[in-house]
Image (cartoon, helix red, strand yellow):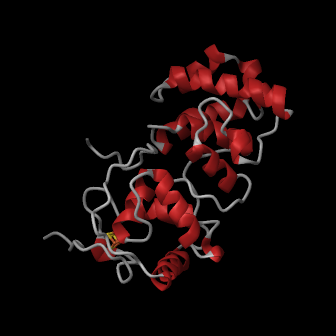
Amino acid sequence: MTPNPTSNDAEPDWQPRPRQRVMTDAQVEEFFRALAAIEPEPKGELNFTNPYTLLVAVALSAQATDIGVNKATGPLFQRIATPQDMLDLGEAALIEHIKSIGLYKTKAKNVMAAAQILVEKFGGDVPQDREALETLPGVGRKTANVVLNMAFGQTTIAVDTHLFRVANRTGMAAGKTPLAVELKLEKRVPPQYGLHAHHWLILHGRYICKARKPECWRCPVAHVCLFKDKTQPQG
Ligand code: SF4
């Protein structure tokens, strides 16, 4: 499988190694200290205007790139800001906006069904707890965690393919499934870094600790990373 550098796919593309060494608490703290020193306020790369449009953007981003989603949602979010707006827009018009995104038919159906539920059961608001969010069509644990973190400031960790790889490879939180990694990270991330941990790890995996060839020679956390096969610059 060819890794997609900006994929939001939750499926792990990197398997944990047997007998992976485990970072100490001090190493984990130093890892986040170093990333925070470089980028104190890391941001996700999906565009949105409020909790509802964030929910829509994240739901559309499954197996798609943030850039592709942003292209489609730019004009869409000029027209809709609430679940009722989405219902008024209708599924056919939504499809016209998002047909450049993979799985757009299924995603359109889910977005419309979720809008209906939000209006009928939640007064048009996006609920602020995971259990309620996961009752919405097309919203799984990862999407719920992104919304809780980015819209409501909760210290949740959404494990995408990049974060899964970094957590395993570095020895910070080894696990065979995204959920196992998430639960370990919840215990390991120092509280002062909880809010931004998810973005630091995702962006680090996307741009430096890449799937095929991590760029260890320019990595700001190489001094605490336990990956055995650190890379050197080519040439
Ligand atoms: S040293 Fe290499 S493997 Fe470790 S976090 Fe940095 S890029 Fe990833």
Residue at position x 26%, y 43% in the image: 2
135 shown above or below 41 = above
Residue 199 % position (x, y): 54, 61
Q: In the displayed structure, does residue 178 sit left or right of residue 151?
A: left
Residue at position x 68%, y 34% in the image: 135
Residue at position x 66%, y 40% in the image: 55
Residue 187 % position (x, y): 57, 69
Quadrant location of the N terminus in the rendered image? top left
Q: In the displayed structure, does residue 150 sit left or right of residue 66?
A: right
Residue 22 % position (x, y): 38, 75
Can residue 206 be seen by looking at this rendering?
A: no
Can residue 7 be seen by looking at this rendering?
A: yes
* 88 or 110: nearer the viewer: 110
Please state the quadrant of the image where ligand 1 appears.
Answer: bottom left
Q: In the displayed structure, does residue 5 sit left or right of residue 152?
A: left
Outermost residue toward the top? 92
228 shown above or below 109 = below
Residue 172: image quadrant is bottom left
Residue 14 % position (x, y): 31, 54
